[in-house]
Amino acid sequence: MGDLALTFLIALVGSLAVAGPGVLLLRQLRHRSVTVHVCVLLAITVLAVLAGVLGAAWEMFISPHDLRVLLIVVAVAGVVSLAVALWRGRRLAAEAMWASQVRQTERQLEASRRELVAWVSHDLRTPLAGLRAMAEALEDGVVADPATVADYHRRIRVETDRMAELVDDLFELSRINAGALRLSRDAIFLGDVVSDAVASAVPVASACGVRLVSAGDGRWPTVRGSEPELARIVANLLRNAIRHTPSDGTVSVSGGRDDRGGWLAVTDSCGGIPEADLPRVFDVAFRGEAARTPGGGGGLGLAIVRGLVLAHDGAVHVANVAGGCRFTVRLPAV
């Protein structure tokens, strides 16, 4: 019993001699990665075993031959354990990073949803109040002259179209965010899509005094995508450019193909976007200070553009150019 008690005491003292500095080392490394902590913990365990073995050998409880055998076993087990710790630590670190990114993404999505609800509530409340007031005026006979009645009818139709457009944008955005968007991809000649979108946007541009120019004749690429969604991308970019371009300004559409695939660019004369706002241009419900006016749109058009482009395995970005800004869309070319 005396030998067993002495062996226990030697193992305890050796383990504490290793564990004390190990704990201090872990405190110093508390801001390091999970991999480092796991490796240090296993190193402490192996060194504690080694200290106990060496202590027992020092007190002649282990023969030289048995000591060599134990040292080989401890060394091999230590190397294998550290290798496993390094592998598993990296996996744990990657999973922790992924979980942190997921939580951050969820927080951002929740903030975007709250902001979207606030924006939609604001954008619906104003036209609904106007529609109610005009409908009550017509119903109560407050306005009776044909010109005023016709003006009220026209304004009701305009506000109704605005709300229908907002609802369509919300539906499209919900499909994108829910992953319910299913694309039927074919080889699409981008020039035809742009030509139709420009033809539809010309009356709107003319009403705003904006000149619309298509500069991609003969260079349009053939891309792989879904024609309705590609048409929505081009239409939203054109509508956004026309809305923010002052009268007598120009909106130009160009395109082509390079070693990275097909591309489409819409350049306007808006005067440029503040550098601080550039990273937020494609965020849901972001419209910038200057656009927070009636008729300024629901702030969903560019968010829909980004979602549809990403669904096509493409990319979209914005940059300031002389006198305005340029939105560039890259799509996989056939």
Image (spheres, grey):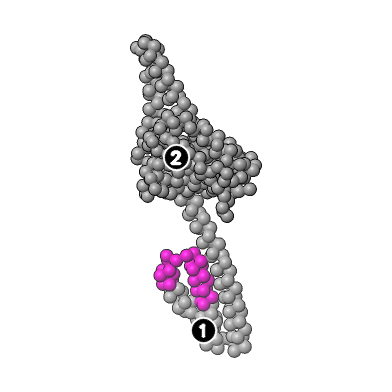
Residue 39 point in image, percent of width and height: 51, 70
Q: Earlier in the sequence, mark 2 or mark 1?
A: 1
- Name the quadrant of the N terminus: bottom right
Q: Amino acid at mark 1?
A: Gly
Q: Amino acid at mark 2?
A: Val
Residue situated in front as seen by the camera: 9 or 150? 150
**Residue at the spot x=51%, y=66% of the render?**
35
Residue 100 point in image, percent of width and height: 48, 54
Vertically, is 259 above or below 204? Answer: below
Tell me the SS state at disc 1: helix
Q: Which residues are magenta?
A: 23-48
Q: Quadrant of residue 181?
A: top right
45 in the magenta segment:
yes
Q: Quadrant of residue 273?
A: top left
Q: Is residue 71 left or right of residue 294?
A: right
**Residue at the spot x=54%, y=75% of the render?**
46
User: What residue is disc 1 on?
Assistant: 55
Q: Main secondary structure of the magenta part?
A: helix
Q: Is residue 283 visible?
A: no
Residue situated in front as seen by the camera: 239 or 190? 190
**Numbered mark located on residue 251 in the image:** 2
Mark 1 neighbour density, 10 Å: few (under 14) some (14–19) many (20 or more): some
**Residue at the spot x=57%, y=50% of the render?**
257
Q: Is residue 261 left or right of residue 281?
A: right
Give the CA separation, mark 2 to mark 1: 83 Å
